[in-house]
């Protein structure tokens, strides 16, 4: 990241504190005023005439210089960001790795801490439908040409929500790839689009400055808002002082005419999405930002895997 103003102010504050501390120490021990030119001239006279000067004076001077440099290093050099995952998060990841090594697919081997210990609502295994844990990916019914013609020619759609969800399903193969290309061309890094709350997303892309884009097709804006709240809660639980800005958009939203989610972007076509994204491209990364972005990208990959295991 670029050096921010707050870091510069902290460094100035640190230099002032060290300078005042040094002045106090030398005045107290040696009666030497570091702000006095006459005192420094007298010290140079003693050194030139080879008069003995206390070794403690030089030792303290070296120590204070080292403390000053070390403090500036700590303030300037970017520290590695620590990501604290909750215990249930860590156990799920460890269990997935163990399951992959043993080639086991039995979901009953997952070791999840009790809800009372974690403070997280956990559903009992007997009440959870196994199909919702890992939904089938290829059981998609492709409508015939007659069906599509009937939908497009019906001026009075009796079930607009179901029809738009069918349209969203049909868009997966071709248009979802086009949506990803739009963000790739704008400089964003696309990730595997996860299924959140049982709804398949069309896009998940990240940019610098901890930016994330989450896009869907043919659903309600309130459903996308619920998905954003869920992923934002994961960020809040696993990050201490890092805020990730999540931007959401829906193409052909079911409730576009009466949407209550003003912060959700709504587009009537992929073309309008392309026109908008071209106005907000992801700025290129400099050398200082690349390391932080790689760590951010790895964190998002971990979150996506965690969402997929829920």
Image (cartoon, helix red, strand yellow):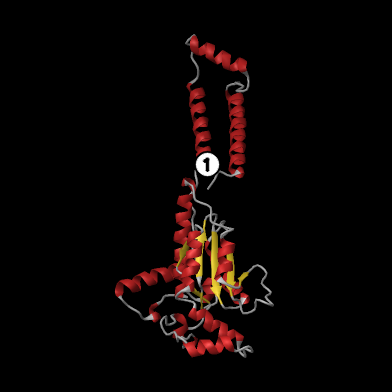
Q: Is residue 234 above or below residue 134?
A: above
Residue at the spot 49% in from the left edge and 43% down from the top edge = 77
Q: Is residue 118 above or below residue 206?
A: below
Q: Is residue 262 above or below residue 40?
A: below
The answer to whether residue 230 shows anywhere in this view is no
The answer to whether residue 253 shows anywhere in this view is yes
Q: Residue furthest left?
A: 102
* Mark 1 lies on residue: 76
Q: Would you say 77 lies left or right of 268 here?
A: left
Of residues 239 and 171, the one drawn nearer to the viewer in this rendering: 171
Of residues 46 and 300, the one drawn nearer to the viewer in this rendering: 300
Circle 1 residues within 10 Å: few <14, some 14–19, many ≥20: some
* Residue 300 place in picture, x, y as percent: 48, 63
* Residue 223 place in picture, x, y as percent: 59, 77
Q: Quadrant of residue 259?
A: bottom right
Q: Is residue 38 above or below residue 127?
A: above
Q: Secondary structure at mark 1?
A: helix
Q: Quadrant of residue 217?
A: bottom right
Residue at the spot 51% in from the left edge and 26% down from the top edge = 61
Report the number of discs. Answer: 1
């Amino acid at each position: 990241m670029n050096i921010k103003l707050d870091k510069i102010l902290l460094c100035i504050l640190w230099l002032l504190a060290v300078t005042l501390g040094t002045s106090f120490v030398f005045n107290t021990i040696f009666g030497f005023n570091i702000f006095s030119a006459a005192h420094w001239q007298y010290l140079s006279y003693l050194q030139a005439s080879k008069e003995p000067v206390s070794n403690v004076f030089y030792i303290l001077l070296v120590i204070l210089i080292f403390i000053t440099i070390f403090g500036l290093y700590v303030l300037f050099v970017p520290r590695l960001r620590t990501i604290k995952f909750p215990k249930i998060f860590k156990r799920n990841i460890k269990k997935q790795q163990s399951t992959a090594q043993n080639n086991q697919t039995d979901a009953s081997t997952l070791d999840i801490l009790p809800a009372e210990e974690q403070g997280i609502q956990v559903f009992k295994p007997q009440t959870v439908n196994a199909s919702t844990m890992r939904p089938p990916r290829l059981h998609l019914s492709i409508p015939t040409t007659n069906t599509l013609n009937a939908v497009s020619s019906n001026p009075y759609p009796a079930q607009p929500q179901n029809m738009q969800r069918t349209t969203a399903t049909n868009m997966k193969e071709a248009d979802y790839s086009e949506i990803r290309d739009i963000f790739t061309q704008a400089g964003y890094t696309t990730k595997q689009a996860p299924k959140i709350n049982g709804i398949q997303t069309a896009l998940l892309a990240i940019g610098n400055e901890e930016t994330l884009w989450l896009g869907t097709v043919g659903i309600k804006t309130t459903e996308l808002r619920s998905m954003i709240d869920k992923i934002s809660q994961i960020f809040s639980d696993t990050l201490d002082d890092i805020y990730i800005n999540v931007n959401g958009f829906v193409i052909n939203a079911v409730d576009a005419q009466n949407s209550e989610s003003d912060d959700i972007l709504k587009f009537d076509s992929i073309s309008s999405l392309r026109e908008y994204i071209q106005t907000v491209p992801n700025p290129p990364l400099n050398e200082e930002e690349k390391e932080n972005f790689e760590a951010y990208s790895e964190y998002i990959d971990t979150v996506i895997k965690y969402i997929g295991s829920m």
